[in-house]
Amino acid sequence: MFLAIKEIKREKLRYGLIILMIFLISYLIFILSSLAVGLASENTQAIESWDAKQVVLNKNANVSMSQSLLTKDDLSKTKLTKNEALLGQTLVVAKNSNRPQVSAQFIGVKKDQFIYDDQELIAGRKAKKDREVVVDQAFQTKGYKLGDKLELNGSANKYRIVGFVKNAKINIAPIIYGSLASWRKLRQGMPNIKASAIISRNANYNYNHANSKTYPIAQFIKKLPGYTAQNMTFQLMIGFLFVISLIIIAVFLYILTMQKMHNFAVMRAQGIPSRTLVAATVSQSVILVVVGVIIGLAAMWLTAKVLPAAVPMSFTPQIILSGTCGMLLTGIIGSLIPVRSILKVDPAKAIGE
Amino acid sequence: MAVIELKNVQKVYGTGAAEVQALKQIDFKANEGEVVLIMGPSGAGKSTFLTIAGSLQKPTSGQVYINGEDIANISAKQSNALRLNQIGFVLQAYNLIPFLTVKEQFELVDHVKKQGNLNQATMDKLLEQLGITGLVNKYPSELSGGQQQRAAIARALYANPKILLADEPTASLDSKNVDEVGQLFKKLAQNYQKAVILVTHDPRLEKYADHIYEMMDGEMIKKQ
Ligand SMILES: Nc1ncnc2c1ncn2[C@@H]1O[C@H](COP(=O)(O)OP(=O)(O)OP(=O)(O)O)[C@@H](O)[C@H]1O
Ligand SMILES: [Mg+2]
């Protein structure tokens, strides 16, 4: 530690550059992770707010709720407890002559079931009639007000906003909660259809009758359009950043170690154990990473503060923890590469050169 | 008493056609309180001698005694401790750590050797004798060659070793400084009871020596 700190103090420019590099990389890691988590949660936050465990869909729908239709026949054997709710989903474009258009997910629910009961309103009240809807806060940020009327998919019927809910997004689109009856009207057609899905909060719920099939929620989320591909893209980028930071730390420390070889030989000749020299290199790397990451965290914190709410970033404690630990690990591994050379220093080289 | 003694020491580098007999049957002895000079032309084996006497390398054959103990076959760890506690090196150049101030060079010793280092009063006196009292907060690159050399001597003495091994200690000094350093080594040997072994080309140091050895082609002859 002594040697590590003294050297960083003496060679401020050199180590400042490494810290700058680590800061930039960790900042990028934090941004990408926050974006990944933010986007992932915009895909799933409604599902999470329902606390869904199982979902029943039409077995021919390829595990996609928007493709799924359950008929009266499919649902004929269901026993719905307070942990199950019927739900109808369809993609709509919401219009109001004074406001911007919004692509949204219309979710029809039944009044006596938990998805309706558990809605967390941040303004207004719950929908009581078929022509009333409760919408995601994204509408609010776009300028919509309570009492505004929405035209959905160019329908003649207008739906009045009576409330705003928090965290109601699915597959990145804000949700419009209405009644199941309205949903049936929006789907226009087949008189037999009852819902798109049954959502259950019971992990053991299982219902497989006619075309109905039950899927665990994890499988359903994985199949959300674009969800898996998007997550993998982020993981790949973040993984690459860790590899890059590993290479940068290793290469820099290796070059610096090579330059110090003679000093190491002198210290070994003076009886300084190689353990001390190894500890100096490893702790140097840890110090550089810690300082770089702290600056990265501060920059990220500022970024998260100034960014508009519309940017789907969520800078969670978990990101802070795993990003920091990941960088630390990278730093330690990176510093082990020059350690090999330090252990091989020949103290006799200190003399006669 | 002989603090350091080499008996029948041989050192061979390489094998076969590349074999070099750097030291042939060396016998050597130095006592507490003595300044011993080792002189000789380039390639004679002087540095090789220092590395073996300083436990930086093992001899090919023969015995090396330090305080009466044979160190020819000690472990790397023991040899490390021996260098830390018993031997002070004053090397020709770069033997100060560039990113530590003079004072921090001493502190580094405190970090690995907790006891037996010179106390503050002795150190202050030594620094004064060396004429570098005001320079303790400077980095080596901020010192002149002579000041660096004296700081290196202070560093070597800080761990209070019995033996001081110096390689060309006057290489970068002018005549006046050579005399100062020569007197200093003499004083160190006498006042602090060290065995001071100086490898040098510099005949100006001869007048401070108690004994002089001459090296040539790996052989050592006692001249004085
Ligand atoms: N590591 C080594 N491997 C092989 N041969 C070596 C090695 N070190 C020294 N030698 C050889 O051993 C002989 C003695 O070398 P040494 O460095 O001890 O001489 P020296 O008296 O210190 O010379 P100088 O005054 O130039 O420093 C030389 O012939 C040299 O080439
Ligand atoms: Mg030499």
Image (cartoon, rainbow, N blue to C red):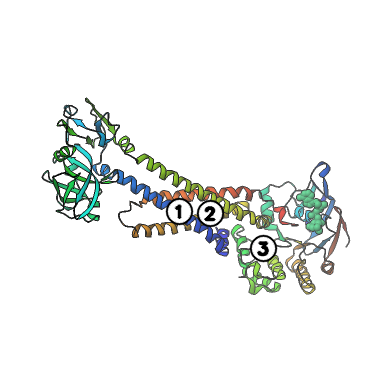
Label 1 element class: helix
Mark 1 CB within 8 Å of ligand 1: no
Residue appearing at x 78%, y 69% in the figure: B182
User: How far across and how far down the image is residue A163, in percent?
Assistant: 17, 51
Q: Is residue A106 above or below residue B135?
A: above
User: How far across and how far down the image is residue A259, in percent?
Assistant: 64, 56
| Residue located farthest toward the left when viewing the structure as drawn | A129
Residue A287 appearing in the image: no
Q: Is residue A54 above or below residue A306?
A: above
Q: Are the residues flagged by discs 1 and 2 from a single subunit? A: yes
Front one among A60 and B17: A60
Residue A228 appearing in the image: yes
Give the left or right position of residue A287, taking residue B117 as reference: left
> Residue under mark 3: which chain is it in?
B
Label 3 element class: loop
**Spatial CA span between label 1 and label 3:** 36 Å
Q: Are the residues flagged by discs 1 and 3 from a single subunit? A: no
**Spatial CA span between label 1 and label 2:** 15 Å
Residue appearing at x 40%, y 41% in the figure: A232
Residue appearing at x 77%, y 64% in the figure: B33
Q: Quadrant of the C terminus of chain A?
A: bottom right
Q: Name the residue tied to disc 3.
A: B96
Residue flagged by tag 2: what amino acid is it? Ser
Q: Name the residue tied to disc 2.
A: A285
Residue appearing at x 53%, y 54% in the figure: A285
Please state which of the two labelled residues, at mark 3 or mark 2, is closer to the viewer. Answer: 2
Residue flagged by tag 1: what amino acid is it? Ser
Q: Name the residue tied to disc 1.
A: A26
Give the left or right position of residue A77, taking residue B201 as reference: left
Q: Is residue A288 above or below residue A169?
A: below
